[in-house]
Each structure stands twice: as C-alpha cells, then as structure tokens.
Amino acid sequence: MTDQEKILNEVTGSDYKFGFQTNIETETIPKGLNEEVVRIISAKKEEPEWLTESRLKAFRHWQTLQMPDWAHLRIPEIDYQDIIYYAAPKQDAKYESMDEVDPELLDTFNRLGIPLEEQKQLAGVAVDAVMDSVSVKTTFQDTLADKGIIFCSFSEAVKNHPDLIKKYMGSVVPYTDNYFAALNSAVFSDGSFCYIPRGVRCPMELSTYFRINAANTGQFERTLIVAEEDSYVSYLEGCTAPMRDENQLHAAIVEIVAMENAEVKYSTVQNWYPGNKEGIGGIYNFVTKRGICKGDSSKISWTQVETGSAVTWKYPSCILKGDNSVGEFYSVAVTNNYQQADTGTKMIHIGKNTRSTIISKGISAGKSQNSYRGLVKVLKGAENARNYSQCDSLLLGDQCGAHTFPYLEVDNRSAVVEHEATTSKIGEDQIFYCNQRGIDTENAISLIVNGYAKEVLNKLPMEFAVEAQKLLAITLEGSVG
Amino acid sequence: MQTLDKYLELFQKNRKQIGKDDPPFMKKLRDTAIASFRQSGFPGRKEERYRYTHLEPVFDGELSFDFQPRQIHFDDDEIFSCDVPLLDSMVVTVLNGFFHHPGKEALTRLDNGIIYGSLKEAIGQYPDLVKKFLGKNAPTSDEPFVALNTAFSQDGIFLYVPEGVRMERPIQIINLLLSDKNHMVHHRNLFVLESNAVAQVIICDHTLSPHMFLTNSVTEAYTGENADLDLLRLQNEHNNSCQVTNTWISQERHSRCQHGTITLHGGIVRNNLRINMVGEGAETSALGLFLTDKMQQVDSYTVIDHRKPQCTSNQYYKGVLDDISTGAFNGKIHVHPDAQKTEAFQTNNNILLSDTAKMYTKPRLEIYADDVKCSHGATVGQLDEEALFYLQSRGISKEEGRLMLMDAFTWDVISKIKHPSLQERITELVGKRLRGELSRCNNCAMHCQE
C-alpha cells in the first residue's frame, strides 16, 4: 500500500518526469540529409574510409526505399530534411575521471537517476551514457578490461577494434534490411559496443542510457553485442527525452551475436517522451533489434518495458540458427492518451531443437492504439522446434484499441507451435474486491496492472524492475475515469 | 497481355451477351463492378490478404467461359450420385454455374411464400426484391474476386424465406462442373431470410470431368431480425481444379447463423468469409475443416465484423495436412468502438503429417471497444505421441491409432454440425478421406484419372 501511495505522490503534478532540458551547449550540423551530411558525420567522427563508404552505400540504398506503411500506425509525414542528424555535447567527450565531466551534465544524469557516480559502484552497474548521439562516459572500463570484456562507445570501438566492428557490424541487421535500418546505417552517430570473450561471465550488468536533448535532432544509435563461446552478459538499455511539442525521430539498430553456449540477456525500459495529453509532440521510435544465436545451445532473451514514445515500431527478433538454441521475448507495452505502438517479435527457427517463448502484455488506455505483431517461422530443417506464444491485451477505457497480428509459418511437421491471445478489460469484480478492502480505484488498477505484467517484470534485472513498476503506474495515471 | 486486361477485354467484347436480359440496376451493378476490378486488379503476391495464395496465374490459364447455359445432356443418376444421399432435402442442381432444371420450372414459389430457384429468373420476376439485396452486402470495392464475379456471373441460386416461415426441409444445392475443355465459372447465390425465418442450406461442389475448372462464386446471405440460417458447404472437387468462394453474410438483431466449410478435395481452394453483424445481439459460429494431401492448397480467410453491441461469435477451424500440401488460415475479429459486451472467440488447430506440408496461420484481433471478451488460439503440431503410445499399448496398431486420433481431431468440428444425418454422413466422408479413399468412387460411374 505505502509503495503504491508513494508512486502516486511522486507523480502528482508531473506528467512526464523526465521532461527537463539540459542547458548544455551542443554542437550540431545544419538540418537536412544528403551525401554531404553523411560525409560530415563520418568526418566528425574521424572514421576510416571503409566506414564512410558503407554509410554512403546505405544512404544510396535508403533513397530507393519507401517508408513502410504496413504497421497498424498512423504516422504523419516525416520530413527527413527537417531533422538534424548530428548533435553532440560541445565539450570533448573524453574524460579520465568523473571530476572532469561537466557538472550540469552530471546533474542531468543524477536527475535521471542514472548510476553514473562512484556510489553506484555498489550497484555494480557499468554505464555507457549516450546523450544526443554521443557516448559521454563509460564507467568501469578498467574493471571490465581485466576480464577482457570490451565495453565502449561505438566510435571508440571503430578506432580501437576495427576488425571486430568490420566483422560483425551489419551481419545481423544489414543496411538493406528495412527503411529505418538503412537510414540508421547511413547516419548513425554513436552507440555502444560490447564484446565478451570466450568463457567469460560478465560480472555486472552493462547498461546504456539514451537521451535526446537538443531540439529537432534525431537520435540514431547503434548497439552491437558479441558474446563468444560460453560467455554470458546481461545488458540494460534505458531511454528518455525532454518534453518538446514537435516530434523527434529515433531510429536505432541493435545487433546481438551469440556463439556456442553463450547467453545474452537484453533488457529495455523505454520511456521516451510520449507527447502530451492532446497527442502533440513525442518521439517516433523506429527500432530494428535482432539477435542471432549463431552457435549451438546459445540463448538470447529480450525483455522490454515500453511506456514512452508517441509512435513505437519495434520488433526485437531472434534468429535461432544453432541447434538447441533458445530465443525469448518478454514484453510489456503500455500506451496512454494518443500513443501508438506496433510491437512484437520474430522468431526464426533454423536449427534443430530450437525453442522460443513469447510473452507479450499490452495495456492500452485513453485514446491509444496498441498492437502486437509477431512472426514465428519454422524452417524445414528445424526439427523438434518448439514455440509458445501468449499475447494478452488489457483495455482501460472505451476509446482505445488493442490488436494482435500473429503470423505462424510452419514448414516442419515435428514442430509444435502454439499461440494464445486474449483481450479483456479489468474485471469490475476485481476492482470491487479491492475497493471493499479499502483500496481506492486508482490504486486497485495499478495493483491489478502490475500483477498482470508481473510475468514480464520478473524477468527484468532488479534495479530495472523497480523503475519499470513505477513507470507503469505513472503512464497509466489518470487513465481511469 | 496482362491477366487483368484479358478480363477487361472479355467483358467489353461480350458486354451485350453478359446478362442479356438485365434490368437497368443489374447493368449498373456490373459496370461498377468492372470499374472497381479495373482499379484493384488481381491481388499480387505482396498483398497481405493473398500472401499465401497466388491466384493470378490460374486466372491467366486458357479457359472457356459460357454466357448462356450450355445444353449438356446428362443423367444425374447415371454419372453422379450424391455424397450426402438419403437426406430429406430439396435438391437443386447447378451445372457449370447455371441452374439446371430440365423439364422443371426455373423458379418455384411454395404456398408458404418461400421462393427458390434460378437467380437469373428471380432478377426477371422479382426485380424489386433482388435489387434490395443483391450486391448490397458484398460491395465490389471490398474484394477483387467479388467484383469479378459481380461483373461476370450469369446465374446461381436464389432463396427467399418470408417473415416467420420455417423451412421444413433443408435446401441442397449441388454445383456440378462438367465440360470437355478447361472451363471457368462465375456463379452467384443470394439467400434472404426475413425476420423470424429459419432455413438450412447445404452446398456441395463437385467436378464430373477431369478437366481443369476454375470457380469463382459469391454467396450473399441476409438474416433478418431473429432469423436463423445454417449454411454448410462441402467442397469435393478434383485436385486439378481451383475454387474461390466468397461468402458474405449480414446479420440483423438477434439473428443466428452457423456457417461451415468442409474441404475434402480440390486443387487450389480459397474461401473468403465475411460476417457483418449489423444488429445487436447477433450470434454466429463459423466452422472450417480441411483435409489436404498431394499438392493441394487450401486458404481460409475470415473476417467477423462486430459492429453492434452484445454480439457473439465463435470460429472453429481445423486442418490436417499431408504430402506437399499447403494450408493457410487468416482470421480477423474486428470489434468496432461501440460494440461493447462483444464475445468473440477463435480457434485454429492444425496437424502436419509430413515433413513437406506447410501451414501458415494468422489469427488477428482488432479491438476498439473495452468491455469485450475476445481470444484466439492457434496451434500447429503433430499427433500426440503419448496418446498414440497409449493406444498401441492397448493393442491397437500404430496406423489404426493414428486414424483414431485424427478422427477425434476432426470430430471437434464435425460434432458442431447441427443436422444429425448430415453430421453422420460427413463423419463417414471425413473418415474415408483420412483413410485415403476417394469418397466419391464407391458409387460413381465416372472413371477419374486420380
């Protein structure tokens, strides 16, 4: 009870608690997108020739593409020439110790509750914070380096580990994959790179925070995680943005490669600015996330809590290539007011005895539209493949929509594929029960929603689970009439 | 020449022949239809609804088409015996898309006001009645094959059940295809049930000669307030044929409808079903069962449109796939914003018997109202090994055990067929089909090349 109250108190008077803007001078380039801009971005990052070429190739391909319209989303025309494709905090982002970091920037992160400071060492989190596309600081690099783990910003990796980048970048999500992947491949600014060597179990949770700060900028980060044989890593990603009344674009790529026996756990708490109550502003979140279980008995697990963004278009996927590999997808997507989400997963079973689990919980309130779209594909060689999918939708309010579009494509008789979906609203009897125990309706809803999403929240690492629970309560605040 | 142009040309060239005695409203209907077909064309591979079934090449084949019924003399009893005999029903025969009534009236009006017979004749005799319903529920802009049918269809079956009348016996429509060359048929049925009327319709599709047949049929049905319609389709064409069926049903307040499709044979089969619930408290159930082998392709596409509150729908689709056959199920439940208290359920279970069979299933929910109970479930798998082992441990051979399990699997759908003797007959047909026997051959005088 007290927790619930605290949550409500915390959010009283503020709709979006991360809606502050940091007055840090940023270095931006002019609006617009053309080959010149791509070259400028590449030059600013002092990139080698091959990367510039690969960007240009992606850009040329992007020009031939049309924005996809198959999703159950209404997206106003996006003027790609009206976006700034590069914005970096002006200070050179190379710090030796925390003291050198701009105090105002640190304050930003403090307000975000990012464990960037020393005290957070206890929490055992190594953070790579990406603000407006540039990686600001990676903590604990030394600790990780001892183990041979590489965890750094993408541009650093390009400088220091070009072979790895060359080998794996685009190997899971090629630039030809889709419209937004092509765009990202052309103009990506920075991101995180993580390499876990053979047999190493990463001792702490690795974490990235993304924040869009400057106005009119798009954020295009790229994450690449490579887990060698017998390794393990748990990776967290959090996103926020200040309040603005124009829409901002976010198009990211996440690639994961898991070798034999490796396990990668990727958790996201996405809380980009969702726009105000009238549906003005907010982030357009178009993300391509894909992992490949390359080796036998490898495992990739996606967990996501999606509460933000005006529009979400996101399908974290697993290619289960190695025999006995496992793919998991746990998702809670909450939409309120005028938010729209079209999210889900793809599980491609290629290897023998591959297994996948999909648990998706959608919650829609206000005038929002929430869709689950998922594909389970079992190829001919995927003997004894097994999939279980469950997609539940909860409707709060009579003007919202909840939709499910699962695709099951089975090409092997030994496969067992199951899909279940339900849509319902919170039972009046449940609320009544809470009421007569002295819990008011708002709290009761929060309680029931948290219980409903528990199955997924349980999969999150501890620190994130607490935050995610709060986020759920905040997002749904005021949605009960 | 593109397939689309071919059909547009066929229409323009024979504009005078097509529906020669059409009243003005029919002419208009056909012109609108061909215009929307010109716009939509054949659905391409990229089109979501036709992702798994590509029909254009079939329509592009060398096919003859009749604008007038061909005089074929054949004796029903000699070359054809019905799959569902001894059913106390009124039998009407449709030959190559035209009502076949040698020596009988084209349109029968019973004492209690029921009208049944040729749609073409009905258009002539009761233009006002037909005009009120024909093409209203199945708009040509929705579906290219409905548009194509509206433009080309010449005849079919018309059934009218007046207010409060209960049809004592089911009406059985037997669609026969018989030709000496590859042939295309567009035929159209219209069933109208006024309020409180009750009717049962069975449609059986057969091919009587081994040529390639392409059928594109549209069935429009209206159930008035509190009316009850039971519509069952038994598809049993040979594997060299292609069949596209479009069934559009509109349901008024508190009406009940049961729709079933049993697919035993047929090369490429595409069944489009759309049920529009336009009145409160309507109930519907849609059943589907398909058994495929060889190179068969069966694609079921359903849309249940919940437009008004308190409607209930149940969909139950099952498939058993063998050899290199392909199955697809694409079912959508659409709940409109004010359709509160909707209950909509959908189940799709499939069994793959071979490594080369493929099943694509895509159940969809689109829900815009909050006080609803909706669910869908889909599975693709194989026979339960444990159950099979149990049967074997009781001395039942593996093969027999498999058949028993498949019988049980299909029984879930068959058990929901209301008419008892029909249910019995279909159980038998499905059983035979599972044993790999050709259900028709026992008492069929035709020597097929199967």
Image: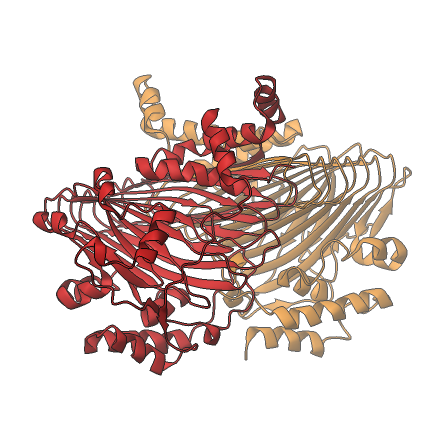
Chain colours: A red, B orange
Residue nearest the observer in this picture, A181 or B332: A181
Q: Residue at x 34, y 83 (%)?
A: A36
Image coordinates of residue A19 in percent, x first then y, are: 47, 53
Q: Quadrant of residue A41?
A: bottom left
Q: Residue at x 27, y 60 (%)?
A: A135
Image coordinates of residue B11 in percent, x first then y, are: 69, 74
Q: Quadrant of residue A275?
A: bottom right
Q: Is residue B187 visible?
A: yes
Q: Residue at x 45, y 66 (%)?
A: A215
Above or below B4: residue B127: above
Say whether residue B340 is left or right of residue B450: right
Residue nearest the observer in this picture, B70 or A387: A387
Say whether residue A381 is left or right of residue B431: left
Q: Quadrant of residue A57?
A: bottom left
User: Quarter of the image containing the C terminus of chain A?
Assistant: top right
Q: Residue at x 50, y 51 (%)?
A: A341
Image coordinates of residue A358 in percent, x first then y, are: 38, 40
Above or below B415: residue A213: below
Image coordinates of residue B371 in percent, x first then y, are: 65, 35
- Callout count: 0
Residue nearest the observer in this picture, A230 or A15: A15
Farthest right residue?
B111
Q: Is residue A172 visible?
A: no
